[in-house]
């Protein structure tokens, strides 16, 4: 019985610590974001490349803000959970991108 208990404890700890990944939104592809050219790219092109935004806001006369968010958590048994956050805000005026802000937080692969 003692041996069964010793085997059962690590199995339970492993199964509790290794949950399913949690994701909200659609991952944002940096290559697609780099294709956005302020003063040239249209709102329609942004939606075609990235899909519908999570939120659209009117920020002034003829000005819109498109907000794209992505958040994921990958549970880890042996360390802290891996969290990734990506946010993109695209500001347009009269249907043309004026500027955008792209932010990333969390762990990403490092390339040379």
Image (cartoon, grey):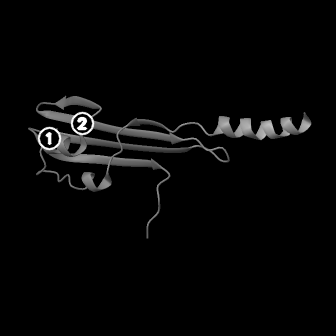
Where residue 90 appears, as percent x and y from the top left, is 24, 42
Q: Name the residue rendered at 28%, 36% in the picture.
A: 67
Judge the density around disc 1: few (<14), some (14-19), many (≥20) Cα neighbours within 10 Å.
many
Residue beneath disc 2: 66
**Which image quarter holds the C terminus?**
bottom left
Q: Name the residue rendered at 25%, 52% in the picture.
A: 32
Judge the density around disc 2: few (<14), some (14-19), many (≥20) Cα neighbours within 10 Å.
many
Hey, which quadrant is residue 23 in on the image?
top left
Name of the residue lying farthest toward the left: 94
Hey, which quadrant is residue 34 in on the image?
bottom left
Of residue 46 and residue 56, the one placed in the foreground of this image is 46
**Which image quarter holds the N terminus?**
top right
Q: Name the residue rendered at 47%, 63% in the picture.
A: 110
In the rendered image, the vertical position of residue 48 relative to residue 24, given as above or below: below
Residue beneath disc 1: 43
In the rendered image, the vertical position of residue 22 relative to residue 109, given as above or below: above
Of residue 14 and residue 83, the one placed in the foreground of this image is 14
Instruction: Please count the marks in the image.
Output: 2
Where residue 31 appears, as percent x and y from the top left, is 28, 56
Using residue 17 as the reference point, say whether residue 45 is left or right of it: left
Hey, which quadrant is residue 47 in on the image?
top left
Label 2 – label 1 distance at C-alpha = 9 Å
Where residue 8 appears, as percent x and y from the top left, is 79, 36
Using residue 46 as the reference point, say whether residue 95 is left or right of it: left
Q: Name the residue rendered at 31%, 38% in the picture.
A: 68
Name of the residue lying farthest toward the bottom: 112
Which structural element holds mark 2? Answer: strand
Which structural element holds mark 1? Answer: helix
In the rendered image, the vertical position of residue 47 relative to residue 39, given as above or below: above
Of label 2 and label 1, which has the lower sequence position? 1
Instruction: Tell me whether the residue at label 2 lies in contact with that at label 1, contact meaning CB atoms closer than 8 angstroms.
Output: yes
Q: Which mark, by number, is residue 53?
A: none
């Amino acid at each position: 019985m003692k041996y069964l208990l010793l085997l059962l404890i690590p199995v339970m700890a492993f199964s509790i610590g290794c949950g399913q990944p949690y994701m909200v939104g659609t991952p944002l592809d940096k290559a697609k974001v780099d294709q956005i050219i302020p003063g040239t790219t249209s709102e329609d092109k942004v939606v075609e490349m990235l899909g519908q935004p999570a939120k659209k806001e009117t920020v002034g006369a003829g000005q819109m803000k498109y907000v794209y968010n992505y958040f994921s958590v990958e549970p880890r048994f042996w360390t802290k959970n891996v969290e990734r956050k990506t946010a993109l805000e695209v500001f347009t005026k009269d249907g043309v991108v004026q500027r955008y802000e792209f932010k990333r937080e969390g762990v990403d692969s490092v390339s040379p």
